[in-house]
Image (cartoon, rainbow, N blue to C red):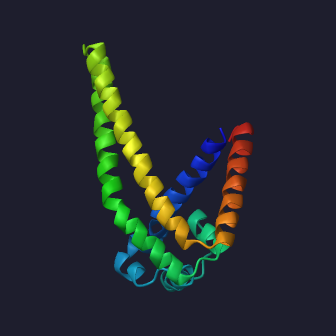
Amino acid sequence: MKFDHYRHHYKILILFLLTLPLQSPIALANPVASLNCLSPNCQEQIYAQRYGNKPRRRGAEKLMEQLDLSDTQIQQLNTVRQKYRPQLEELRKKIQGTRQELGQMIQGNASSTDLTKKHQELTNLDQKMHNLRFQSMLEMREILTPEQRVRFAQLMQQRRENRRNNRGNGN
């Protein structure tokens, strides 16, 4: 059970770090400018030039500020993300296709043996995805300082508690 607790942290870390540069409307609106401007401060300046001084703080940006990532760390995290992104995207597509195939087989007349084989194929793909995400997380983890790792774990715990509380309130 304790492993599942940490596994959840790692999933969140990986998802956060893999999508770090995609969290900003600047990156989506002008990818070339965002490549030359990866730090939150620089992106805030570009945002202010484009959209005025309207306040904006998205979850990932807020988290980056709270972790106090340096420009170098942001660039290193982006490098790791770019390294794993094609492999993760390919696996995601394979998983999606295999899930669809399994769903069609379940609705059709496929034998239990064929369904079991397809399910095993899906399970193997899922495991490959988890392994790849774990590998990328290990590389990203090395970029964070020990203090940032502790702070990240605390922030993720707060997010989980907030989600739990919001679910309990019917949100």
The x and y percentages for residue 105 are 27, 22
Q: Is residue 102 above or below residue 93?
A: above
97, 119: nearer the viewer: 119
Residue depicted at 30% across the width and 59% down the height: 86
Q: Is residue 56 visible?
A: no
The x and y percentages for residue 128 are 37, 45
Horizontal arrangement in the rendering, residue 111 relative to residue 92 (left or right):
left
Residue depicted at 58% across the width and 66% down the height: 58
Residue depicted at 49% across the width and 70% down the height: 24
Q: Is residue 82 visible?
A: yes
The x and y percentages for residue 143 are 53, 72
Q: Is residue 92 above or below residue 79?
A: above
Q: Is residue 75 above or below residue 14?
A: below
138, 93: nearer the viewer: 138
64, 150: nearer the viewer: 150
Residue depicted at 55% across the width and 81% down the height: 44
Quadrant showing the N terminus: top right
Write down the quadrant of residue 144 in the picture: bottom right
Q: Is residue 113 above or below residue 101?
A: above
Count the marks: how many? 0
Horizontal arrangement in the rendering, residue 60 relative to residue 166 (left or right):
left
Quadrant showing the C terminus: top right
The x and y percentages for residue 48 are 54, 83
